[in-house]
Image (tube, rainbow, N blue to C red):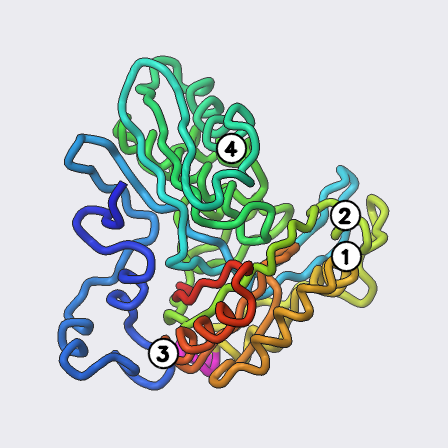
């Protein structure tokens, strides 16, 4: 698997080349000879499906980052009612589909060892869910290159599952919003629907309510996972909500669009909200606080927060260069941590 989708560079290269604005101006932070080339680049689609030279379909499964996450209460069915502003990163797993008569999956990559048994992988669960709804569906063997940490609060498995559904939809000539695709996504996991079309948007309910795509300017960011897995169920349990309970003095607050699409307005919105799971996750894994403190002390970091139920944290920076410098410093200090400068869209 190469680092390209339809001839376009993936991951770090795409992050840099697809960047339109960082809050200081178009192309800010790029060397002068590259600025004109950068400005001429088309916007990069994180969910794009391409075709390899070998005839395989392929796509990226980008990390999902919860810029905000409010817990409104716990429903009678036991699920927690959430409202979250999510964005997606250039940091991604890679997924290929080779057409064939049967479903299959192979997994490799630097974080494959933490992905669990292949038979339980959400890629196969999503594919089986779609095949069960559409008799005669064309199938094939998936090859997943795992680069995102598992159980990390950035939806790696959910994004992989959504990528599998995109690939099967393309193979079968189905629109990505086909009812069977949406139903299979919801059945696979709460975070899968929002990952089908990886663009910034609001998600609500247990994750099944997905809002329209938002015009979020690319945000220079640094993702850090301090090498611990935090069980999602344990984090929610520390909230102490019984079915039917509401969070005290909590009402949903909508993302405002009337301030204009500026980086400062986006940051103001994010700061006005929070991640309600950060405190319970910190109680379970104090090293999350160490990572957050490291981000907050980095030059150019404008905001630092945990994503999802942890343990991954993110910092939003003045520009890509500031994020890259911070990444180099953190890697030198903590060589066992997963550290990734990227863009959020």
**Is residue 264 highlighted in magenta?**
yes
The crowd level at tag 1 (other Cα within 10 Å; few <14, some 14-19, many 20+) is: some
**Residue depicted at x 56% and y 47%:** 209
Q: Are marks 1 and 2 in contact (CB under 8 Å)?
A: yes
Q: Find the distance from the CA under tag 2 to the CA under tag 3.
A: 37 Å
**Residue depicted at x 19% and y 72%:** 38
Q: Which residue is mark 3?
A: 321
Q: Which residue is mark 4?
A: 122
Q: Find the distance from the CA under tag 1 to the CA under tag 2.
A: 8 Å
| N-terminal label among 2 and 3 | 2
The N terminus - image quarter: top left
Quadrant assignment, res 145: top left
Front of the two marks 1 and 4: 1
User: How far across and down, in percent of the image, does residue 191 sit?
Assistant: 55, 45
| Magenta residues, start to end | 259-265
Q: Which mark is residue 284?
A: 1
Q: Which residue is mark 2?
A: 234
| N-terminal label among 3 and 1 | 1
Q: Find the distance from the CA under tag 3 to the CA under tag 1.
A: 33 Å
Describe residue 100's horizontal placement relative to residue 274 as left or right.
left
**Is residue 230 highlighted in magenta?**
no
């Amino acid at each position: 698997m190469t680092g390209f989708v339809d001839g376009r560079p993936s991951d770090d290269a795409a992050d840099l080349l697809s960047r339109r604005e960082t809050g200081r101006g178009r192309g800010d932070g790029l060397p002068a000879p590259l600025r004109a080339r950068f400005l001429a680049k088309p916007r990069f689609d994180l969910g794009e499906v391409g075709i390899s030279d070998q005839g395989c379909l392929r796509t990226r499964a980008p990390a999902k980052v919860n810029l905000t996450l409010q817990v409104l209460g716990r429903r009678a069915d036991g699920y927690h009612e959430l409202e979250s502003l999510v964005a997606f990163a250039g940091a991604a797993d890679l997924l290929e589909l080779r057409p064939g008569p049967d479903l299959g999956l192979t997994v490799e990559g630097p974080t494959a060892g933490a992905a669990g048994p292949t038979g339980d992988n959400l890629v196969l669960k999503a594919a089986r869910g779609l095949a069960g709804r559409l008799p005669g569906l064309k199938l094939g063997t998936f090859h997943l290159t795992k680069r995102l940490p598992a159980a990390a609060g950035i939806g790696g498995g959910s994004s992989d599952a959504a990528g599998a559904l995109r690939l099967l939809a393309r193979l079968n000539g189905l629109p990505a919003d086909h009812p069977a695709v949406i139903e299979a996504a919801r059945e696979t996991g709460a975070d899968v629907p929002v990952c089908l079309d990886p663009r910034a948007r609001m998600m609500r309910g247990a994750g099944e309510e997905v809002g329209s795509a938002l015009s979020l300017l690319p945000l220079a960011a640094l993702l850090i996972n301090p090498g611990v897995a935090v069980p999602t169920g344990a984090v929610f349990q520390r909230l102490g909500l019984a079915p039917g309970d509401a969070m005290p003095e909590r009402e949903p607050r909508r993302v405002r669009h009337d301030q204009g699409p500026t980086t400062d307005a986006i940051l103001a919105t994010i700061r006005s909200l929070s991640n309600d799971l950060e405190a319970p996750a910190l109680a379970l894994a104090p090293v999350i606080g160490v990572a957050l403190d490291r981000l907050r002390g980095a030059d150019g970091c404008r905001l630092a927060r945990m994503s999802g139920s942890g343990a991954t944290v993110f910092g939003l920076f003045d520009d890509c260069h500031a994020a890259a410098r911070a990444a180099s410093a953190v890697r030198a200090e903590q060589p066992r941590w997963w550290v990734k400068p990227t863009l959020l869209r």
